[in-house]
Image (cartoon, grey):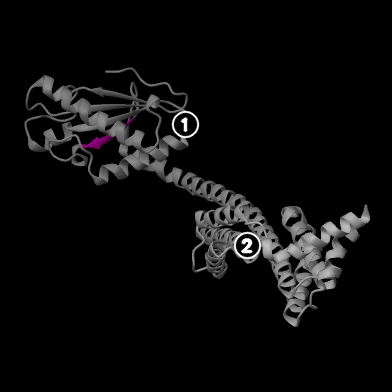
Amino acid sequence: MSLRYLLLSAVVGMAGCASDPAPFEQMRLTERALEQAAAVGATTSTQEYRLAEERFALAKKNMQEQDYRRARMLAEQAELDARLAEALTLRGESEQAITVQNARIERLRKQLGSLR
Amino acid sequence: MKWFLWVAPALLLCSGCTGSLGRQELADAQLLFDQVKSDPQVLESAPRDVSRAGESLARAEGFAAHWGTDADVEHYAYLSQRYSQIAREHDQLVRNQQQSQRLQREQDRLQQMLREARLLSAQQRSEWLDEQLQRLATMETERGLVMIIGDVLFEPGSSELNLSASRTALQLVQFLQLNPRRLVRIEGYTDSRGEAEENRELSRLRAQSVAQTLVDMGVAAERLQVIGYGEAHPVAENASARGRAANRRVEIVFSDENGQLGAER
């Protein structure tokens, strides 16, 4: 029993990098993460978004070259780069909104002060 | 058994040890993960990302400790860092949104205070308004309080109000806002030139125009009655230009405090 597992895992282990399956699903996930980031307004002015695009482009190239292991790694990294870009963009927007609100409150306080 | 399943190929492959770059990435990932996992607020607002940061970190450590290549260690350490960063950003977003809501409430509160302060100063002005009204108006026993808007407030031959009429209208609006139970009848009058029927129509249009201005400024239309009397009820003789000018007018008849309007003429 344990010998069979040992052999099996040895085979799988040795097969390793040479025959990683093509990461189609990961490529789709990454593409969607990039679209999602762009949809909330992330652009190449965000370093993380640039990284995501560059890595995804490389991953596509690796897919064509059937270097699936590298393609998967790059696509996984690109997915999280894109998600971070999205989170940074949303956080930045929420900070801008706070700045606007603070200015508005400041104006209201002044108006109130001038009435008293 | 499972442990053996994973270690076996590692032993067979026996890959090289982790390089300094991988160790650096791993240390960074560990530091970031320690920060986010010890922050209960981050845990609450981004639990999935925190736990994925932990899983990725564990994989990176596994690779570093056993059989992984430098690239594997770096990769999972990188993913772990990203998950931690995403969790932190997400948490910051949630905090900002909460602050935004607080600020919105503060803004609403201030706006409310400002409205009240303005109303208060309007009430202080109301004494002045009352005086103004008394000055503009003439008491007439059977008709109540009457305010006369002269024809200078209309563009000649037109029923459009000019600018100074709008200012008078604004005072009227404020008065009506401070006296919510009072109603008004807006009566239009002309001089005796021209056809009587046309004059009635013109006088009604002018009265309507005043009413429309009040409605535009927020007075409920139900509080306003509009009548055109034409050349009837002159206040001066129609022989002179001066007398005719005095006859071209709009009179605002105010009800008493209880909304009781005097009878129509």
Pointer 1 chain:
B
Give neighbour class at mark 2: few <14, some 14-19, many 20+ (Cα, 10 Å).
many
Residue B156 image position (x, y, % from top left): 13, 39
> What residue lies at 19% left-to-right and 27% top-to-bottom?
B203
Q: Which residues are magenta?
A: B146-150
The answer to if B255 sits in the magenta stretch is: no
**Residue A31 occupies quadrant:** bottom right
Reading the image, the residue beneath label 2 is: A68
The one nearer the camera, B144 or B84, is: B84
Instruction: Say what secondary structure mark 1 lies in.
Output: loop
Prevailing secondary structure class for the magenta stretch in the rendered image? strand
Relative side of B22 to B249, left or right: right
Asked if residue B36 is positioned above or below residue B217 in the image, the reply reads below
Instruction: Say what secondary structure mark 2 lies in.
Output: helix
Q: Is residue B39 visible?
A: no
Q: Is residue B48 visible?
A: yes
Amino acid carrying label 1: it is Pro
The residue mark sitting in front, 2 or 1, is: 2
Relative side of B1 to B82, left or right: right
The one nearer the camera, B216 or B243, is: B216
Labels 2 and 1 touching (C-beta < 8 A): no
Amino acid carrying label 2: it is Tyr
> What residue lies at 83% left-to-right and 68% top-to-bottom?
B10
Pointer 2 chain:
A
Q: In the drawing, what numbered circle is on residue B144?
A: none
- Specify the quadrant that holds the C terminus of chain A: bottom right
Reading the image, the residue beneath label 1 is: B180
Residue A93 image position (x, y, % from top left): 55, 59
Relative side of A83 to A4, left or right: left
The alpha-carbon separation of the residues under discs 2 and 1 comes to 78 Å
Residue B14 image position (x, y, % from top left): 82, 73
